Image (cartoon, helix red, strand yellow):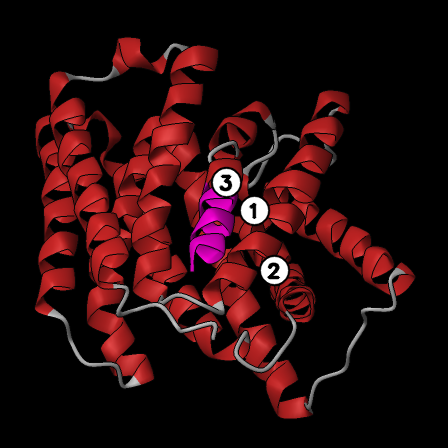
């Protein structure tokens, strides 16, 4: 149990860097995700092949993993779009709505009983987002994109919960990333037609940031996350993901001085979100009801 929570928090800490790296990369959100996927897939494939970890799955499972990977690719596109239209702090804070979405959708998708406490904690995080959205209208487009990204990552995590129950985490990761890459490749011509960009090829600094994003913030973080998801509920994972803004926003303050551009309502809203995270983690540690016994 403690090991699963530790791995989950390491993954969330590493994901906290994705926002800062996303702003550093000059590509638009679609191309950024496309390059991130291809670097990650190539690295993961050769790594698994060298360690003889490549495993096959049934055709039905393959298509399921491809579909879930498509959700992940869209989540990344909306997330980085949120950064481009607002800033790192706003985009990361919007992910806090994941808790409410999961509390409502997990019972529908996995036949889990609706838990009122989880709904209330999710609503607390939503109130935090509302304070930022209502009183600081400069970032409305970025906030909308960020909330959509949160909805997509909620669905992704709930569906992923079933996959890691009977497949190795890295196998799940590889097939999902391949599915996301294939879908994004098919849609890319339409994407670039409606949202043209100045350059399609990463600049020299971009290559370094893309590799760091792929190796550390994707392969390593997803590996830890999928291992943790074998032991804990999707809601616990998604509410824990609300700590990602804590790490990411601190980095954004240090690297980009974003604290100079945020109003007091951002801090009020962020305080409510952090309170929801703390209350849920205390509830999980105390009751341990949503953890699968490792005995």
Residue 214: x and y in percent read 67, 43
Q: Is residue 284 above or below residue 80?
A: below
Direction from residue 25 to residue 252 in the image, left or right = left
So how many labels did they put on this image?
3
Q: Mark 3 or mark 2: name the one nearer the start of the chain.
A: 3
Residue 292: x and y in percent read 39, 73
- Is residue 157 inside the magenta stretch? no
Label 2, secondary structure: give it: helix
* Residue extent of the magenta highlight: 1-12
Which tag is nearer the camera, tag 3 or tag 1? 3
Q: Is residue 153 above or below residue 80?
A: below
Say which residue label 1 marks. Answer: 30
Q: Is residue 100 above or below residue 114?
A: above
Q: Quadrant of residue 9?
A: top left
Say which residue label 2 marks. Answer: 184
Which tag is nearer the camera, tag 3 or tag 2? 3
Direction from residue 143 to residue 121 in the image, left or right = left
How far apart in space, not on screen, are marks 2 and 1 (Cα)? Answer: 8 Å
Q: Which mark is residue 15?
A: 3
Residue 275: x and y in percent read 16, 39
What residue is rendered at 30% in x and 31% in y?
A: 90
């Amino acid at each position: 149990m403690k090991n699963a929570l530790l791995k989950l928090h390491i993954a969330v800490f590493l994901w906290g860097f994705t926002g800062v790296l996303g702003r550093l990369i000059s590509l638009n959100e679609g191309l950024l995700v496309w390059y991130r996927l291809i670097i990650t897939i190539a690295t993961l494939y050769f790594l698994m092949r060298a360690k003889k970890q490549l495993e096959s799955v049934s055709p039905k499972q393959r298509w399921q993993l491809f579909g879930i990977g498509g959700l992940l690719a869209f989540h990344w596109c909306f997330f980085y779009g949120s950064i481009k239209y607002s800033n790192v702090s706003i985009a990361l804070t919007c992910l806090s709505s994941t808790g409410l979405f999961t509390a409502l959708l997990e019972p529908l998708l996995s036949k889990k009983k609706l838990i009122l406490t989880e709904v209330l904690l999710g609503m607390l995080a939503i109130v935090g987002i509302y304070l930022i959205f209502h009183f600081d209208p400069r970032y409305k487009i970025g906030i909308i994109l960020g909330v959509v990204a949160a909805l997509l990552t909620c669905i992704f995590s709930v569906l992923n919960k079933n996959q890691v129950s009977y497949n190795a985490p890295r196998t799940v990761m590889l097939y999902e990333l391949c599915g996301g890459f294939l879908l994004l490749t098919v849609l890319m011509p339409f994407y670039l037609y409606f949202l043209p960009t100045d350059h399609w090829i990463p600049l020299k600094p971009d290559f370094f940031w893309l590799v760091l994003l792929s190796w550390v913030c994707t392969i390593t973080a997803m590996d830890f996350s999928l291992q943790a998801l074998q032991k804990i509920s999707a809601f616990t994972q998604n509410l824990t993901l609300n700590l990602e803004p804590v790490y990411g926003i601190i980095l954004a303050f240090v690297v980009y001085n974003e604290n100079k551009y945020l109003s007091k309502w951002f801090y009020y809203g962020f305080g409510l979100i952090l309170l929801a995270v703390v209350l849920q983690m205390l509830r999980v540690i105390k009751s341990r009801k949503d953890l699968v016994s490792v005995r």
